[in-house]
Amino acid sequence: MARIVVHLCAIGSFLMPFDSLSAEPMRPTVRYYPITHASELSAIRELGPDEAYVTLNFEIAEAMISRGVDSARIAISQLNTSDEHYPGYVQAAPNKQLVPLVPFHFDRSVLIVLPTYNERNNLEALIRAIGQYLIADILVVDDNSPDGTGQLADELSGQLKHVHVLHRAKKEGLGPAYVAGFQWALERNYRLIVEMDCDFSHAPWDIPRMIQASTTADLVIGSRYIPGGGTQDWNMQRRLVSRLGNAYVSIFLGSRIHDWTGGFRCFRQELLADMDLARVKAKGYVFQVEMAWQALQLGAAISEIPIRFRDRLAGQSKLGWPTIVEAITEVPRMYFRKPPSR
Ligand SMILES: Nc1nc2c(ncn2[C@@H]2O[C@H](COP(=O)(O)OP(=O)(O)OP(=O)(O)O)[C@@H](O)[C@H]2O)c(=O)[nH]1
Ligand SMILES: [Mg+2]
């Protein structure tokens, strides 16, 4: 395989950190390895710190990721050229994720719903990071967070016209916040609706992959439990709770879906419109199970793409015993409940 060294200079300097001593921009050098055909996938190997792959389409990228390549280290070139010397990406910082110089722009309107409760220290950074990867509107659904996340969201919405805010009076859990956000999206006719945590557990660079995958699926689930997926920085206890939770759900609802509780998803408008959102009662994690189960019962086309789930960047987890108890009792009930009618 050809070895191609790309020195990124002026094109990406606006994204690069400055060396405080010399006040000169640091210029991370990325060595890109092109993978343009499926036949080259067998050459895939562990990448060094400043190495990355470049490919010309999402299908090859997905094949690479399912073979273990970190999606943060793949440039999916948007340039209609096979010149891999210029993939149109820069590195956010040495040894960090790649960032496209021009965000992806899909032909269907996209709304990203971010539920927030005390996410003040993550919100702005996440909104800005999302904007580097794709053109999309963002809806922050805040439940009157005591740390002022809602006010910060209002300020950001004043500065950035693609950012919207839905204020709710009090904390009711993830489920009701998402249902309110989905109803807001349907009233405004967004074609694709993405849900993700507002804590960097879900990588913004994976959103374009989700949107692309939704060309052939009504529901795309970012999955930790298929080849190429996983969790990073989680302790044994968190891993166990998540694994056991998924195994428990599978006993009742089957293993057609590998990551029932994952909260990084993309819904097609038509599927959400067919779902009976008013009857979704779940508040915590089990909300994700209930939505996926309804989608299956409606005969939706569901795809899972591998994601690496990271521990939250800042702030505190809202996972607690009430959420776990709700899941234990609600999953069997779901199994026995009548399917939704279209
Ligand atoms: N609006 C609203 N958002 C919530 C509520 N509970 C959690 N969230 C948000 O939902 C997302 C997921 O919640 P987390 O606390 O991160 O829970 P988690 O991701 O399951 O747990 P961790 O992995 O430990 O972070 C985050 O963006 C939270 O701020 C709620 O009651 N209302
Ligand atoms: Mg989280």
Image (cartoon, rainbow, N blue to C red):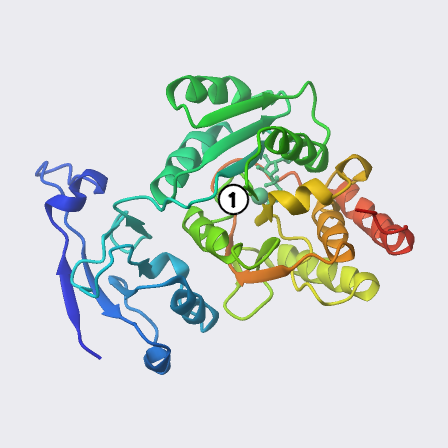
Q: Which residue is mark 1?
A: 312
Tell me the residue at 15%/36% (across/down).
20
Q: Is residue 147 left or right of residue 105?
A: right
Q: Image quadrant of ligand 1?
A: top right
Q: Nearer the viewer, residue 4 or 103?
A: 103
Q: Is residue 240 left or right of residue 114?
A: right
| Image spot of residue 304 (x, y percent) | 58, 61
Tell me the residue at 61%/42% (across/down).
269
Tell me the residue at 33%/61% (across/down).
74
Q: In this rendering, is residue 222 above or below 133?
A: below
Classify mark 1: residues with Cα within 10 Å, few (<14), some (14-19) or many (20+).
some
Q: Nearer the viewer, residue 221 or 248?
A: 221
Tell me the residue at 37%/82% (across/down).
42
Please indicate, yes or no, whether residue 118 appears anywhere in the rendered image: no
Judge: label 1 CB < 8 Å from ligand 1: yes
Please indicate, yes or no, whether residue 127 appears anywhere in the rendered image: yes
